[in-house]
Amino acid sequence: MSNIPSERIWIYRFIFIAVAIFLILANLMPLQMIPQRWPWPNILLLVIFCWSLREPNFVPVPLIIAVLLLQDFLLHRPPGLFSGISVMILILIKAITDSSDDKSFLAEWVRVSLAFAAISLIYHLVLTLSFVNTSQLRISLIQTIFNISIYPFIVLVSHYIFRVKRPYFTRSGRII
């Protein structure tokens, strides 16, 4: 457990809720009159992964589930499928990160990249196996590539603007 005051934790939880609502509503706005050729990256999922891996106290799992379910309902996706897959893989990635000795950004980026690829493929596979009309796999993979490529920018914004930083560990394992 980190030494963050509870007021700061709650402030960041409210900031996360505000950012999540803004991103969901921005996704719903019609910005163009013609259909888009390229899918936008899922910024909300990027923020969730970034904040969860860097400071898990700011975004607890029930809050993540609520926000992702809200996104499922508002974007007319099958309720709970995308959010369930995302939360399960996020918990798995958090467990792998906690047990790993390599806490570098490159290792985090590789883990998150594999997580986004797994989320995309599992989501598309489940929709295909249940005979739900879905987008092409090519579109999902393009969005995954965009997610992976924009993750470092989300980390920079979270670090320098929102001050969501990874705790530093000493050689003895203590958190600074």
Image (tube, rainbow, N blue to C red):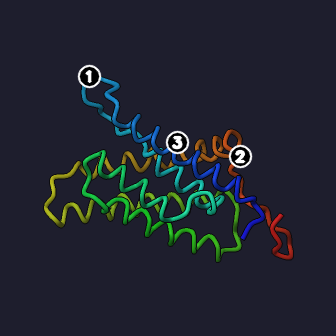
Q: How many circles with numbers are drawn on the protein?
A: 3
Mark 2 surroundings: few (<14), some (14-19) or many (≥20) residues within 10 A? few
The residue depicted at 47 percent of the width and 47 percent of the height is 44
Give me the C-alpha separation between circle 1 and circle 3: 25 Å
Query: Dot 3: few (<14), some (14–19), or many (≥20) neighbours within 10 Å?
Result: some
The circle on residue 61 is none
Farthest front residue? 7
Q: Earlier in the sequence, mark 1 or mark 3?
A: 3
> Quadrant of the image for the C terminus?
bottom right
Q: Residue at x 66, y 74 (%)?
A: 100
Disc 1 residue crowd, few under 14, some 14–19, many 20+, Cα 10 Å:
few
Residue at 35% over, 39% down: 39
Please report whichever mark, 2 or 3, sits nearer to the chain's N-terminal start: 3
Sequence-wise, which precedes: disc 1 or disc 2? 1
Where is the N terminus found, in terms of image quarters?
Answer: bottom right
Q: Which residue is mark 1?
A: 33
Q: What element does badge 2 sit on?
A: loop
Name, please, the residue furthest toward the top: 33
**Residue occupied by mark 3:** 19
Amino acid found under the numbered disc labelled 3: Val
Image-based side of 66 in relation to 59, left or right: left
Give the secondary structure at mark 1.
loop
The residue at which mark 2 appears reads as 163
Q: Which amino acid type is shown beneath numbered disc 1?
A: Met
Q: Which mark lies nearer to you, 1 or 2?
A: 2
> Is residue 141 rendered to the left or right of residue 77?
right
